[in-house]
Amino acid sequence: MTSPTSGKTWFITGASRGFGREWTIAALERGDRVAATARDTSTLDDLVDKYGDSLLPLQLDVTDREADFAAVRQAHEHFGRLDVVVNNAGYGHFGFVEELTEQEFRDQMETNVFGAMWVTQAALPFLREQGSGHILQVSSIGGISAFPLVGAYHASKWALEGFSQALSQEVAGFGIHVTLIEPGGFSTDWGGSSSKRSEELPAYAELHAQVAEARKARIGTPGDPTASAAAVLAIVDADEPPLRAFLGSAPLGIATADYESRLASWREWQPNAELAQG
């Protein structure tokens, strides 16, 4: 076990790039300690060279439940405690619902939902014992809204949102906070080499082109992953952190339009709902 410091101790999955790497650096820069996981820990070598014992690199594929529990246990044994657990590992799958294979859909859920579930379950006994802790689940504006082409991704993030909202109520009495981080479009590799794509069906060729243009307009200017770190640090340092927190300027407008539409539809059909009541 390393000597304790006054800073927080983090466990961050998917730390090789994107949000995970930027938040790892931000935590280390202010004197916190980080257990950072990646499928290939060589991607963290430069950070180990710079930050030394403050960083514990761990090789991890989050879809391996036993490995998740072992990694969390190793991090706790190494640093002596865990304060912030960040389930960041995940990827986006692009494909219309009819284009998805069974394996593609299962793989999306295995990483984005089950991976976060296993790490969460592994961390909870340690957080309960110390009577404190903060779990950050990296969701998306796509965790509360949905658009064509990323149905599998939306399904995974809606599932993450559901179990995390329930979790927040289950663990509040133990002094544990849960926050769903919901970014908009950012300049990460989410839609690049880290993403996966289904084979396109000819029947959807025209819609693929339309959706691509609509997506560009919706995202606008992508956010800066490096700048996102300050917002995340503010959340983890808050005495009463939020259950949900957007990152970026676009999500609030998307959520507002979506929820206003839902409320209007529910109100319009309320007489029908009452008819069903009997």
Image: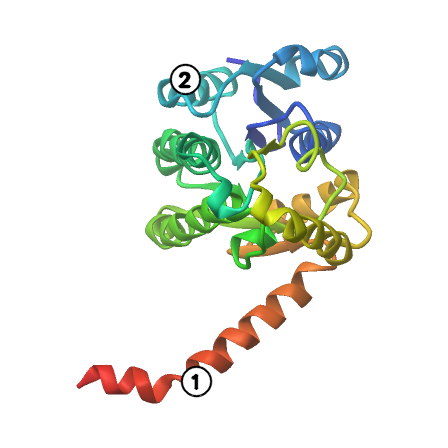
Q: Is residue 135 visible?
A: no
Is label 2 in a helix, a strand or a loop?
Answer: helix
Colour scheme in use: rainbow
Q: Nearer the viewer, residue 181 or 8?
A: 181
The quadrant holding residue 128 is top left
> Which x, y percent locates residue 277?
21, 83
- Is residue 56 at all visible to an observer of this figure? yes
C-alpha separation, residue under disc 2 versus residue under disc 1: 47 Å
Question: For the residue carrying disc 2, how many other residues have a C-alpha within 10 Å: few (<14), some (14-19), or many (20+)?
Answer: some
Label 1 SS = helix
- Along the viewing direction, whichever of 7 and 267 lies nearer the viewer: 267
The residue sitting at the bottom extreme is 271
Seen at 57% across and 69% down, the residue is 258
Q: Position of residue 225 (x, y in %)?
A: 75, 40
Picture disc at residue 267: 1
Dot 2 corresponds to which residue? 67
Amino acid identity at mark 1: Arg
Q: At x 48% / y 36%, what residue is drawn?
A: 112
Figure label count: 2
The residue under the point 52% across, 49% down is 179
The three-letter amino acid code for the residue at tag 2 is Ala
Q: Residue furthest front?
A: 202
Whichever of callouts 2 and 1 sits on the residue coming sooner in the sequence is: 2
Q: Position of residue 165 (x, y in %)?
A: 41, 54
